[in-house]
Amino acid sequence: MYELSIKKMREAAGFKKQPDAARALGWKERRYASIERGEVKLTAEDACVIAEVFGCTPNDLCGWPPGLNEGFADDLDPEEGELLYCYRQSTEKRRSKILETARDQAELSQAQAAAPEIEGLEADQIRSA
């Protein structure tokens, strides 16, 4: 979860205690502490503010490896962006289900492209065909 990365970034920026970071951000201590503990979702706006003060990137705050999300979203169409957003908002168990569904649909699409005459068949019918 991102709260551990926020704490690490805070400490790396030289803020030993949460109140020090809150003051630097111009926020109330309670607000900052709630975000760092993960009790309040980190908004994109807050992530940008924190990143600027801490001298890091929003990706660092989320614990993403370098390059994971840099410039990637520029190449996505709206539906792809929505799918990625939904995946990232899901629990680990639900993420597995999303991936399973996506893989099944990709396999079905490839099978239909290879044999267009069976366009209306479901995935399990194509596997047995």
Image: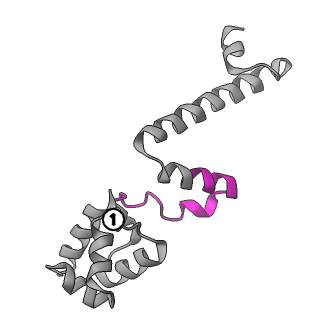
Residue 116, picture quadrant = top right
* Magenta stretch contains residue 69: yes
Toward the viewer: 34 or 26?
Answer: 34
User: Which residue is outermost to the right?
Assistant: 117
Residue 23 in the image: x percent, y percent? 26, 90
- Of residues 77 and 10, the one nearer the viewer is 10
Instruction: Specify the quadrant of the image occupied by residue 15.
Output: bottom left
Q: Horizontal and vertical percent for residue 52? A: 37, 83
Magenta residue check for 128? no
What is the span of residues highlighted in magenta in the rendered image? 63-84
State the image coordinates of residue 120 (x, y, percent, origin top left). Answer: 82, 22
Relative depth, front residue between 22 and 11: 22
Q: Is residue 45 left or right of residue 15?
A: right
Q: Is residue 17 left or right of residue 113?
A: left
Q: Is residue 98 left or right of residue 67?
A: right
Q: Quadrant of the N terminus?
A: bottom left
Which residue is at a point 23% across and 69% down the rendered structure image? 7
Q: Looking at the image, is 115 positioned above or below residue 87?
A: above
What amino acid does circle 1 point to?
Glu
Determine whether, in the image, residue 69 is placed left or right of residue 123.
left
Residue 41, position in %: x, y? 41, 66
Question: Can residue 55 be seen at all in this image of the molecule?
Answer: no
Quadrant holding the C terminus: top right
Q: SS class of the residue under badge 1? A: loop
As drawn, 82 above or below 57: above
What residue appears at the point 73 percent right and 20 percent down from the top-left corner?
122
Residue 12 in view (yes/no) = yes
Tell me which residue sits at (37%, 61%) in the image: 66
Q: Which residue is mark 1?
A: 39
